Image (spheres, coloured by chain):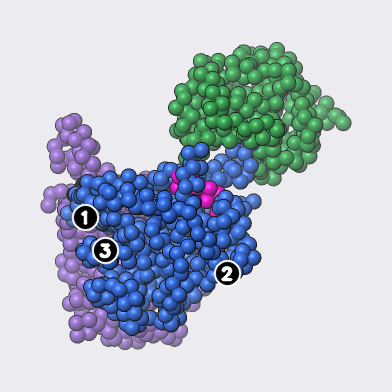
Amino acid sequence: MNENTTVRDAVEQEYRWGFVTPIEQDTFSKGLSEEVVRMISAKKQEPDFMLEWRLAALRHWLKQTEPNWASVHHPPIDYQDMSYFSAPKKALKDLSEVDPELLRTYEKLGIPLAEREALAGVAVDAVFDSVSVATTFKDKLASLGIIFCSFSEALREHPELVRQYLGSVVPHTDNFFASLNSAVFSDGSFVYVPKGVRCPMELSTYFRINARSTGQFERTLIIADEGAHVSYLEGCTAPMRDENQLHAAVVELIALKDASIKYSTVQNWYPGDKQGRGGIYNFVTKRGECRGDNAHISWTQVETGSAITWKYPSCILRGDNSVGEFYSVAVTRNVQQADTGTKMIHIGKNTRSTVISKGISAGHGSNAYRGLIKVLPGADHARNYTQCDSLLMGAECAAHTFPYIEVRNPTAQVEHEASTGKIGEDQLFYLKSRGLSGEDALNMIVNGFCKEVFKNLPMEFAVEAQKLLSVSLEGAIG
Amino acid sequence: MSTPISFTHRFDADFARVAALPQPAWLSARRRQSYARFQHQGLPSACDEDWKYTSLAALERAPLAAQEMGEVRIPASGFDALTPWRVVFAAGRSLPAPPLDTLADVPAGVTLMPLAQALAESRPAAMQYFGSLSGEEAFAEFNSALWGDGLYLELAPNVTLTQPLYLQQVAGAGITTPLRHLLVLGENSQATLIQHSLSGDGAAHFSNSVNECVLGRAARLTHIEVQEQNPQALLFTRNLAQLGADSRYAHLALSAGGALTRNDLTLRLGGQGAECRLHGLTLGGGRSHTDQHIFVDHALPGGTSRQLYKSVLWERARCVFNGRVRVAPGATKTDARQANRNLLLSQDAEADSKPQLEIFADDVKCSHGSATGGLDDAQLFYLRARGLDQAEARALLVEAFAAEVLNGIDASLRPILASWLHAKLETHHAA
Amino acid sequence: MLYIKNLHVAVEGKPILHGIDLYLRGGEVHAIMGPNGSGKSTLALALAGREGYDVTEGSVNFMGLNLLTMAPEQRAREGLFLAFQYPVEVPGVANVQFLKSALNARRVHQGLPELDAMDFLALVKEQLLQLGLDESLLYRSVNEGFSGGEKKRNEILQMLILAPALAILDETDSGLDIDALKIVAAGVNRLRDPQRAILLITHYQRLLDYIRPDHVHVLDHGRIVRSGGPELAQKLEAQGYGWLDDDLQQTIPGEETRP
């Protein structure tokens, strides 16, 4: 436990850092047009190819309509009623302006006092003393040839890499939200791990240099060259407040021959109040491609926040013997809605994929697993195993399972299993009869239910995720 | 839409003919309404989630003409020996006409007559339930507008139909007049229906039939559908059933062949403690495309549903399973399971599986599973190590896989279904 | 220690127990025997506080506390332990994690410091050894995939670690071979102590060869129809439950006149 605490202290110290970069003062007027896209690109002094790409995305986006197939409901979004460039956060004066519910959550999660303000969006201008730590990390990565920087910086310093890989997994025409992101994305992370290099540390947005708030349209691009290995952590357990209700991020992963990428997310965006007011809409496109033989991409996510979550981290298994994995825990309570899952596209021979999805619905929460397993004719001996379990707490919640399984190769073996049930009264009683409180018994059962997912998270993240789950489900049953 | 006349506008003459039939005014008004809706909505497209894996291009393209009833060959059927009660519909008309009073020894309390007659006589149950389940989907409206003939079966409370009712539907070439059947089972009554759809010859045809079944409290219906279609055939069936409290509904669908077969089975468990067991087997070869669409709606508490759908696919055959289970708010103690298993025997076969659970209540037990793959090498090897040759071993494994859908079928019906299955698979192995 | 007075219990509205009186003092071992369906497990589950086992009449005093108003976990923390007839599987929860949480919940309630991982493991390992259980059992999910015998021994392991004031063993002997039975019995005997009471619920006399009870009660149709010493168990073993019926005529009027 002591080690964990140390790690976490380090993490938390670093993590304050992301919020101190002075906030851009420029704000564009509301609305989206070619002019706005040109201004964004000009402002960021981007190369021409980037501007052309953004404009192509915009033109495509204008022809599309918002998808409506997901099992989520929300009032219509007026895309011309937002500002698309660095809208500075509206800073609150002090903690008294913050939703007391949010503050209580910080307390339960043990977030240090000093950080609560930053997380809640209170204007903070303290200067933290961790620059040296961050620089040390950066030096170490640089010595291995690993590039880890903001997307803007990558465009300036390594335009050829960005040009080669950007949009190669999620093209600008991919879907409504991906097109929108492609046209107006503000910033994000870029990682390149050169051939044969094993990244010696977990890369995290915590450690990112210049990690200012990247706003609602974040873009992440991670490339693991042949034989490279990297593990990337996104998000944090503390609920973050953001004035931007719509978040439409895009993450692209490219794993070349023998490379592996592990991408872990803990998402705890503001879910809104008990009625869901003010909660974040999180419409994300995440996709990885195992471009070479023996490549490996693994997604792990713990989704507890946002009013609406819409994301399907996916793997294109192009290289022979490549492996895709998706491990997910999604919790919805109050009136939260989640429609999440994955796509595993088997193209290469002997490709394997594993999908483990655990949905927990409480209160009026609605939780849907939506997944596609597609085995193309050339994918001889492809294997998929999918397991989706849903746990229901309360008569008003909902849990849905929508798998799509398309198999076009007789040597493939594809198996899908799903179960849905109420939390076991027998189990609760058994644990309580050994002296555990109702809440502890619930936590224990739920953590047991999610164990297969948690064990795929990096250690310190797993500990936080468990705690987060407990807090998320507090009071979920009587 | 490159065809000169789209599918939805080919039926004006047929509609004029059925609209002119002697019938109550309300019925012709309803036909008109349905025909207008059918033309207005048109055929579903691939953008429609319910038609994601099934293209209707073949239907649009098919050179089908409406047919006056000509000679239709009635093939001999193994099911004839099973029961004295056989009703044949050839090219959409009952044979011989009138057919139903020729059935001997039908027990008291059983009403069996043409549906049109039941409606003309304003039989209360027929009036109450006709059109109550069929819905507004394109092929349902098509049927409601254009149906020509069909059966009305009504069982009074506590009546048991002692032998199966065998319904043979033989399609002629071209567009067969749609069939419409209505079954109303009173409280605690029991019946077995065998519905056998087949092609009269090798010509292309389009057939459509709709069944509406209403089960009263504790009623039991066993419904066996056997579909044998020629490689040109286009078959669209809809089965709609409403289950009363403690009723039991068993449905077995055996589908073989056909260019395109679409079966929609929609059940509403509308009474506490209702149970259904739904089994289906698709045998597909050539370029056949079969789409099994199941929707089980657990509307009230304490319902039980079981689904087992399997397919055996060779050559370029494709099978779609879309099984949806919905548990309504408050439908606690629901116990629902669905399973889909697909066996691919060739490089070009394809299975698409979409089992769905939509659950709005917490105290439920629901699960589903789907598995697709080829024959198990270890099993094949084991059999061969015991002396079977490759072909025998395969045949044995395939038949064992397929025959699972016959589990739970009444012992008096099982042998004939098993031999039907065996013969169908043998044709394939021989080919 | 435990004073059950005129306990009536109904399950789903159906009365199962019709007035049980039972008094256990510290240091005593009582056995409750009876045919299937006589209400033995109902008594055990009602004492442990299982939801759905409705006490319609009567009282239960446990170490000066009104047991019936307490939540199941409160009962456990006060020192009541039920070894389940059918131990429940809890997927994903490691046995060791479960045991430690349970023990520390009780210790905190008793005002004792929580045991750290090292001390806890030392304690558990010793008990494992005594019960002939493999250490790997600790890291498997609670009861999941356990054999019948492993489940029962796991219950005894929990009992020894939690060291309850009152242990209720519900058919712990069923499904055990003779060697396992001896191990389980030895575990129970180790727990015998003037401060503790044990209530054995069993269908067979076999267990009582290894755990000698001070008192034996016969439960039938929701009533205690006979009480006596260990010799009663032997009589049941020799003659079965049938002979009780003959005497029942005398017993029931006696119960009715009870105040």
- Sequence-first tag of 2 and 1: 2
Q: CA distance from mark 1 to mark 3?
A: 25 Å
Q: Residue at x 54, y 42 (%)?
A: A444
Left or right of B94, for residue A115: right
Left or right of B347, for residue B93: right
How far across and down, in percent of the image, does residue B245 sit?
54, 58
Rendered shade, chain A: blue
Residue tagged by mark 1?
A291
Pointer 2 and pointer 3 on the same chain: yes
Q: Mark 2 belongs to which subunit?
A: A
Q: Mark 3 belongs to which subunit?
A: A
Residue extending furthest toward the left: B431
Q: Is residue A95 visible?
A: yes
Residue tagged by mark 2?
A92
Q: In the figure, the green chain has which letter?
A: C
Q: In the rendered structure, which segment of residues is drawn in magenta?
A: A460-474
Q: Say if B13 sits above or below A329 in the image.
A: below
Residue type beneath disc 3: Glu
- Sequence-first tag of 2 and 3: 2
How far across and down, in percent of the image, does residue A299 sit?
35, 52
Q: Is residue A465 visible?
A: no
Is residue B229 magenta-colored? Answer: no
Residue tagged by mark 3?
A157
Q: Pick the residue in front: B218 or C161.
A: C161
Dot 1: few (<14), some (14–19), or many (≥20) neighbours within 10 Å?
many
Q: Main secondary structure of the magenta part?
A: helix
Residue type beneath disc 1: Arg
Q: CA distance from mark 2 to mark 3?
A: 36 Å
